[in-house]
Image (spheres, rainbow, N blue to C red):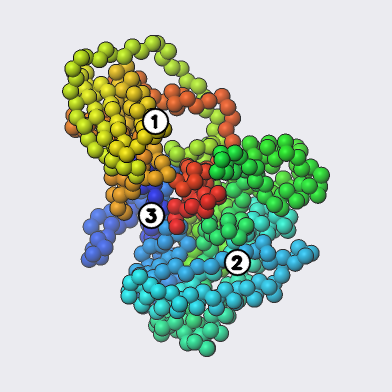
Amino acid sequence: DDNRMLNNFNISVALTDRFMEALNSGGEYSLINPRDGKVVGSESASEIFEMIVKQAHKNGEPGIVFIDRINRDNPTPHVGEIESTNPCGEQPLLPYESCNLGSINLAVMLKDDNSIDWERLRRVTRSSVHFLDNVIDMNDFPLPEISEMTQGNRKIGLGIMGWADILFRLGIPYDSERAIELAERIMSFVKKESTEMSRELAKKRGPFPNFRGSVFDQRGEPPIRNATTTTIAPTGTISIIAGASSGVEPLFALVFKRTVMDKTQMMEVHRYFRELAKEEGFYSDELMEKISERGTVRGLASVPERFQAVFATAHDVTPEWHTRMQATFQKYTDNAVSKTVNFPHDATVEDVKKVYLLAYDLGCKGVTIYRDGSREEQVLSTIKKKKTGMDTGVLRPRERPKVITGVTGRVDTGCGALYVTINADRFGPFEMFANLGKSGGCAAAQIEALARMASLAMRSGVDPWQIVKQMKGIRCPNPKEAPLGMAEQSVLSCPDGMAKALERYLLGQSPSLEEEKTTAPTLDYYAAGHDVEKDEMEESMIVGVCPECGNSLIYQDGCSICQSCFYSKCS
């Protein structure tokens, strides 16, 4: 339930065919001890599925993977059973296998007349397979087990990026049957050519060492160099470098504002849209500003209707079309497809459930969803906040006694040792002082100001737990990260460190953090100084602030990425 506990993880639940059958029939599924394979109990499939769907609706996690479907496509079942995928879901792997992925930029696979250059696509596909196969031999792996498994199966994953770009160039709406048909043609072509090239390499270099006993061997198929050849990855970073749209996703935004080093904002307009708008005579800075604020051109009278359909962005596309597109690419992909199904904020739990079931029915190997505004750290939203009534009575802080006692604790932050003193009177915590050992100037002033405001709040009757809630989880560009799996021990910033110091103090008096506190006024969204009347930008996949450069993170392809400095939480 706490969105900040595992904020660097992509979580998925593996669902079996038996689970899905029990869900369909309204029955129970068996709980099996993985150590000895014995049945130890049973649970209602519908109740567990409801829990999964409600949590996904709440904050986008967990995604789901259909693990039996993945294992039916396991090319080397004699080597082992697949139990999981990589974090973004596109690469099912055996223990100690590694990802070896590449992507073809479809945006440059068009001729001057905007027809697809199939011959160039064939050459690039074959060269890419050859290149990725070479990578396996040239790589130095960190463990002997990884080297053995990677070289034993020689899996590669060639996919595509620039899918939204090529649709723009061809004048095809993302959410159309024409787009589905083109996806079939292109991905089936890449699959066919990559398989043929891998077989040609097998003639020269030999098949992958675990070929004997593989599904290819059992079916009597010709030797092949690579156990798999195709994967569709997120391409979050490489697509930015290539100037292409990401993976098989629709575009995040046609127009958005990028904040640069001196805090000025630059308007970024997708190049194909800019070129077309200027050619057709409807380009203007005022229109671009309006599109940036709205997040879409659909329904905008200034843009000719025939172009509104073509230039679709992620939230213009319904969840059903997102899922259909993923399923189409999956048909011709050996491994899996990384993609996010976007929902509007007002989507219901039932809407999410329908997409999870649709993904299973259409043959997807997994599905990830994101509902607009469903994460606390989302900084921009399509939602217009409503004012609520507030107690406007004047609060008078308790007077400070001449002598007061307390405790001082040390918190290690990314900026050095933070010393936090908490003093109390007979009513509870009364004031807080904080000092960052090596800091001066603005940092020291800001910490002192924050401590003074926290002290004033506590003296005025604000529940200290609410202060913890407001300050805990604030992240700065220089956090002190804890070891993997111990996220709660991380100190994300000086405010986070002060909150955790206060929390530890309070835990010495309270039996549990879960104890509900309702006796004092709370600090809420409005008290934090937000302008609730202003319409916020409809850049609805923005989910936080980049820890590297301070620009916005967007949620795309199942991962949080920065379009300014290429930071990725999945990298």
Mark 3 lies on a secondary structure that is strand
Q: In the drawing, does residue 375 fall left or right of residue 113?
A: left
Amino acid beneath label 3: Val
Residue 437, how many percent across, how many down?
Answer: 29, 37
Which residue occupies 32% across, 74% down?
145
Upstream in the sequence, badge 2 or badge 1? 2
Give the CA separation, mark 2 to mark 1. 48 Å
Left or right: residue 83 compared with residue 242? left
Relative image position of residue 432 (x, y in whole percent) = 28, 26
Residue located at (25% from left, 15% from top): 400
Residue 5 can be seen in this image: no
Rendering coords of residue 474 (x, y %): 39, 37
Q: Residue at x 60, y 66 (%)?
A: 104
Task: Identify which amino acid the numbered label 1 is placed on.
Answer: Gln
Q: Residue at x 60, y 71 (%)?
A: 190
Q: Nearer the viewer, mark 3 or mark 2?
A: 2
Q: Residue furthest bottom?
A: 204
Q: Which residue is mark 1?
A: 446
Q: Earlier in the sequence, mark 3 or mark 1?
A: 3
Nearest the camera: 540 or 136? 136
Distance (Cα) linking label 3 and label 1 = 42 Å
Q: In terms of image quadrants, where is residue 95? A: bottom left
Q: Which mark is residue 13?
A: 3
Q: Is residue 170 above or below residue 305?
A: below
